[in-house]
Amino acid sequence: MFKKIYFLLLVLIYISSSYLLKANAVESDNQIIKHLTIYVPGAIGGGYDHTAKAFREILLEENLVEEVKIIHIIGAGGTLALTHFIHNDFNNEYTVLLGGRSMMGAALYNNSQVSILQTTAIARLNGKPLAIAVPIDSPIDTVEDLFDGMHTDISLIKWIGGSAGAADNLFLKDLLNIMNLDFGEVNYHPVPGGGSAVSEQLVLGRYTAAISTLDELLGAYSDDLIRIIAVTSSQRVNYIDAPTLTEKGIELSLLDWHGVFVSQKTDTLIKQRLNDVITQLANNSKWQSILENRQWENNFLVGQAFVDFVKEEQFTLSTKFQQRPSSKDAKDNFNEQIESLLNNPYRWAIYIALVCFLLLITLFILKWQSIRREVRLQNNLKRVELENQHNKDKLAEKISGISHHIEQEFIKWQLTATEKEIALMLLKGLTFKDIAKARCKSERTVRQQAGAIYAKSSLANRSDLAAYFLEDFMAP
């Protein structure tokens, strides 16, 4: 009986201690967060960086977090940052990833093995309009001018924007579809990491137009280096004298968005604490001022509503990258061929044989191209060497002929050695003063010697002397 009572006391003590530890953990969790790390999938000065710095600014000013560290990982439109984040263990750390439509689109475009759905969505922070811009000295004054140029010859319009698959890249694709233009013919240059690189390249005049998030273009716009000719929001943006596309009869609008994500391994209490902190930030007046000043829309979402939104975005974007067959018959035939191949009992041998055959063909083509390229380069090198040698010989021959002709004329005129030297200086264009200085003689002496040269050659002056020899080398 005593043992049973003792055992029950131990059980009660264990349960009580567990409850107290949990209560202490919750109480500790309600205190200010000591350290928060934000992973930014882009360059400094890019759209994600702007959001991260504004996020950090309010967290620190309102004492929601003691220290905030920002880590930038650039590449593949944010896919590298997403991969790094997913494959690291942040279960006991306050570590978040900024993500959005551009990251999701880039991952799908690059056929990445990682997805934003492999993280836990916490909250959506803002909505960002995109903008179409041209250099300040561009002959394109309005978005109608740009559209006219695209309809005339789409390949002549050189575009610059975000990474392939990013929000700006996909929006341009949707725009061209509405305009009945082929996106495959567009001259588009993606800038990995975004940031100020888009506006800098546009200012240098290397591109006709740019499409990017508005906040990435505001710096150059404020400095009167670029002109924004359209925005992608449903309504005009304050302080920006640019129409929406819907005003111009194009029923297309878009707000890029940025949200906060954590690892799926993150502790539940940490997730809840981050949820509470971000909710406090969203309701903060200073954050509202930042949204207004930076032309960001307040589209805050948190919890399950944001989780559902991310899933819907993933589905919407994935449909944009699905390849649709040109006809039903082609699709049926293709499926039948695939099914027949898969059901073949010797299918693995066929696979290996096909791969080996393709490899051999590829190696043969590469070797043949390499040999042709080497022969072509050798022939070009020999031709250039022969041309250079021929030109050198012709030049040497001409120089020798000129010198010989001048010397023969000097002999015919019976010039002395001194007079020959002065005559050559006169032909080179030296003045009497220069000749006198070079020969350490007076200018008067040089003039007298020049007069003797003119007398012996029956020429009047320096101009006649130069013309005498120049005439011999002019074509009839």
Image (tube, rainbow, N blue to C red):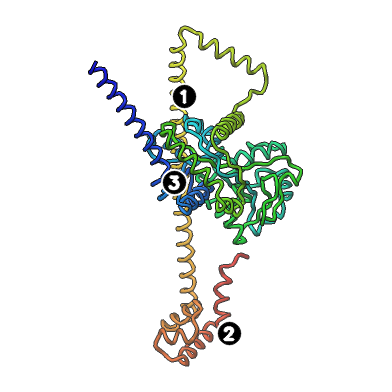
**What is the quadrant of residue 87 in the picture?**
top left
- Label 1 is placed on what type of residue? Ile
Image vertical order of residue 231 relative to residue 452, above or below: above
**What is the quadrant of residue 468 in the picture?**
bottom right
Relative placement, left or right, of 469 versus 70 is right
* Residue in the foreground of this view, choosing between 129 and 465: 129
At 44% from the left and 13% from the top, the residue drawn is 348
**What label does residue 399 carry, if any?**
none
Q: Earlier in the sequence, mark 2 or mark 3?
A: 3
Q: Earlier in the sequence, mark 2 or mark 1?
A: 1
| Label 2 close to label 1 by CB (< 8 Å) | no
Tell us which disc is closer to us: 3 or 1: 3
Can residue 304 be seen at all in this image of the molecule?
yes
Where residue 80 appears, as percent x and y from the top left, is 45, 38
Circle 1 residue = 361
* Residue in the foreground of this view, choosing between 134 and 285: 285
Q: Secondary structure at mark 2?
A: loop
Would you call the spot at circle 2 few (<14 residues within 10 Å), some (14-19), or many (20 or more)? few
Where residue 432 appears, as percent x and y from the top left, is 49, 86
Spatial separation of the CA atoms under disc 3 and disc 1: 43 Å
At 72% from the left and 36% from the top, the residue drawn is 180
Would you call the spot at circle 1 few (<14 residues within 10 Å), some (14-19), or many (20 or more)? few
- Label 2 is placed on what type of residue? Ala
- Label 3 is placed on what type of residue? His
Q: Secondary structure at mark 1?
A: helix
* Number of numbered discs overlaid on the protein picture: 3
